[in-house]
Amino acid sequence: MGPLKLLILQATPFCNLACTYCYLPDKSIKKRLAMEVIEKSVQKIVQAGLIDREFSVVWHAGEPLAAGIKFYRAADAIIRQNLPEGISFKHCIQTNGTLITPEWCDLFKELNVHVGVSVDGPAFINDAYRLDKTGKGTLERVIAGVQHLRDKDVSFHTISVVTKDAVKVPDAIFHFLHSLGPDDIAFNVEEIEGVHDTSSISSVTADELGAFMKRLYELSFAMGSPNFVREIRNAHHAVMGSVMNLPFTLPMESNPLAIINVDIDGNFSSFSPELLGMKHDQFGDFVFGNFLTSGIEELKESAKFKEIATQIIDGVKKCEAECDYFHFCGGGSPSNKLYENGSFNSAETMHCRMTKKVVTDVVLQRMEAMIEHDIPAEYASILA
């Protein structure tokens, strides 16, 4: 189990937006994570020997900036105080961007925070889904927040949700996102997960999504940065890992305790971050303990934890036995398997078809074409 790569902390469940595809419940609860929970979480993870040399603290499951600047200064101090010498970490915040101010930018630089901004594209795409609680679009406020980041020279990336409408306009989305000035851009296909039990992508064919990703790929090449899109970059790495016959590594979401998720009350879980706070007929919730009252050793004795871990690993084995794309993927996302197929011990999902197989095919087709033409210079950096 482990080592820990991501410690995902819920600073607050509250979000000031009401995006139509959000999977999270309880977004109106205005409560902040107690410093005691942060302290106990870090202490017990350290005591369990789960941390190797470095890990990331990801602030997730709500709008993290709603917790306030003072909260993060205090949290950073507590984490540092409870880590042994020689262990390092980095903060990662994924924000909707509407609350960013110059003061937040100063904090990001002070704490060396890796910042991600959630934005789906130009207004006719973004404001159809990313709404505030009065039903109004949010793009103008996002752009204002991004401008603060640029004025303060804070680097950032973007993450966009791909919907049935987005698939039709790759050029408009790419050029808009590029104009914001991010280091790179990423795309999450609209998922069936948690309280979001339908997806507009269900009406999109693999060929249509493939055409969308292929166009993003072409546009990345045209700007001289073939790895500008995260999904393309990940596919490059996966393909080259397979070509070089690198040893298989279990993906973090399937590796027990490589990810530890802690909610606002100190309850903790593992595997896919989306599981914490979710309910299921077979398992009830996905809480394996509470860092205020228990620790990792108790988790290891949990019958529910063992059953879920076993089913997840069996699902990875099923993927390996059934899927030609296994070495480019590693076995899929447990939460998607559960909420799409009804079981962790299952294989193909819409999520893997649309996010792994489609992108892998796009990359393989272009790589094969480039190899046939003696690999031009523009491609050499990818194959290095």
Image (spheres, rainbow, N blue to C red):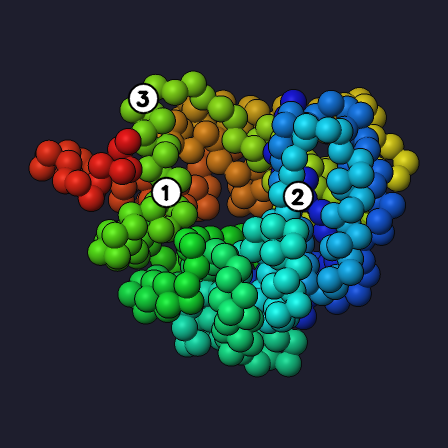
Three-letter amino acid code at the position of disc 2:
Val
Mark 1 highlights which residue? Answer: 233
- Identified at 41% across, 73% down, the residue is 122
Q: Nearer the viewer, residue 70 or 290?
A: 70
Q: Secondary structure at mark 1?
A: helix
Disc marking residue 244: 3
Query: Alpha-carbon distance for marks 2 and 3?
Result: 31 Å
Disc marking residue 57: 2
State which quadrant residue 181 falls in: bottom left
- Identified at 87% across, 45% down, the residue is 36
Mark 1 Cα within 10 Å, few/some/many (few <14, many 20+)? some
- Identified at 54% across, 56% down, the residue is 116
Residue 378 position within the rendered picture, expressed as x and y whole percent measured from the top left: 20, 44
Q: Nearer the viewer, residue 88 or 232?
A: 88
Residue 70 position within the rendered picture, expressed as x and y whole percent measured from the top left: 78, 60
Tell whether label 1 touches label 2 (CB within 8 Å): no
Q: Quadrant of the N terminus?
A: top right
Three-letter amino acid code at the position of disc 3:
Met
Tell whether label 3 touches label 2 (CB within 8 Å): no
Q: Is residue 164 above or below residue 328?
A: below
Query: Alpha-carbon distance for marks 3 and 1?
Result: 16 Å
Q: Is residue 374 above or below residue 340?
A: above
